[in-house]
Image (cartoon, grey):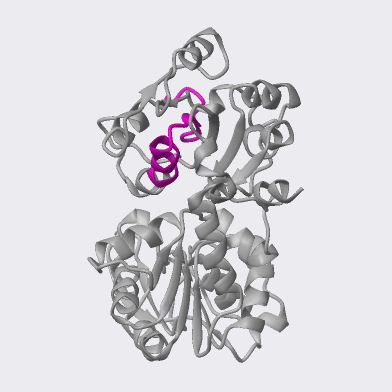
Amino acid sequence: MKYLTDIPSDTLSGTYVLVRAGLDVPLDEHGDVADLFRVERAAQTIRYLRDRGAKVIVMSHIGRDPETTNEAVARALKAHVPVFYVPDIVGVQAQHARRSMKNGDVLLLENLRTDPRETANDPGFAQELAALGDVYVDDAFSVAHRAHASIVGVPRHIPGYAGILVCEEIERLKEARTPASPNVAILAGAKFETKEPLIKLLLETYDHVFVAGALANDIFKARGLAVGTSLISEGVPGLDVLQHPKLLVPVDVTVERPDKQAHVKKATEVDADERIVDMGPDSLGLLAPLVASAKFILWNGPTGMYDHGYGTWTDRVAEMIARSDAQAVLGGGDTVAAIQQAHTQLNERIFLSTGGGAMLEYLTKGTLPGIEVLTQ
């Protein structure tokens, strides 16, 4: 795979560089970017190219609604690098803006998913996008698991390179696939059937695998425990997972009653009308010595229903990791939010991945479609 730094710096001046950035960010009630994490990470590659005189054309998508524009993203990005927002992708307005660029200028095109040909990986759309640049830089690790036109189609037409962020993601996630021991993996979220291959891989690789969130509900149910009205998956964990000596699950849980009141009880005592919304303090106590002694920690997914206000124990896990001396790779939107709220001084020891699904898929397979195409 070729990297951005493989391009001789003195050849970038005046070169049209098409950058696929990962600027899919949440917006607040005022229409402004609510979390600047991905914006700040994307700015590094853009600045690198701009400082060397490249004509940088940034393309990205935002949200699931194809009518959402990149205007708010442009406002947020301007705090890090001068950028001109073009409410167009490959049309007349985009072409005019491109022709008007000077060395060091940065354009941000419209939300790619306003054109349905993006997610359909339409060859014609990929060719139109590629025509905007002389070279292509993939810096969108968060969507590198998607076979979309801007990810896998464009680099088939012009030379493709991995951006600074993608290079760092690959380097740190490779470490997570072969961690130093002692180590511990913490995996939460939902949909056991999609995460089971990764759980099995982690059980082979890590000393301890702590499964929480809705994934733990599936294990509880498979072991014959009552889970009340808790979220469960369609898939059923196999005995090779349920009986694995490295597998750990919460020993106590936070449950929500029908009156919306929450309290903590043993995992074996959940009533039929209760919903598991998080783990409990004894589960944190189970995890604490493993985190404290670990040389490497992998964490993806909050321990409970973080977006429903149940973030107490997720935040406590984040605080523990922040205090530890371990190398740590953390990913998933709520996981990143929790570690940021722990007010730790982030350094090279703790790496926050911009990927959620992409991170999980890379850990499972060791590659992604957006990475694979850059090696061909």
Q: 41 above or below 311?
A: above
226 or 307: which is nearer to us?
Answer: 307
Q: Is residue 237 magenta?
A: no
159 or 193: which is nearer to us?
Answer: 159
Q: 266 above or below 124?
A: below
Q: 73 above or below 347?
A: above
Q: Residue at x 45, y 38 (%)?
A: 49
x, y percentage for residue 201?
67, 75
Could you say which quadrant of the image residue 113 lies in?
top right
237 or 92: which is nearer to us?
Answer: 92
Magenta highlight range: 43-69
Q: Is residue 274 visible?
A: no
Q: Is residue 250 visible?
A: yes
Q: Residue at x 38, y 73 (%)?
A: 349
| Relative to 161, 375 lies left or right | right
Q: Is residue 51 magenta?
A: yes
Q: 260 above or below 148?
A: below
| Relative to 195, 20 lies left or right | left
x, y percentage for residue 290?
42, 89
x, y percentage for residue 249?
50, 81
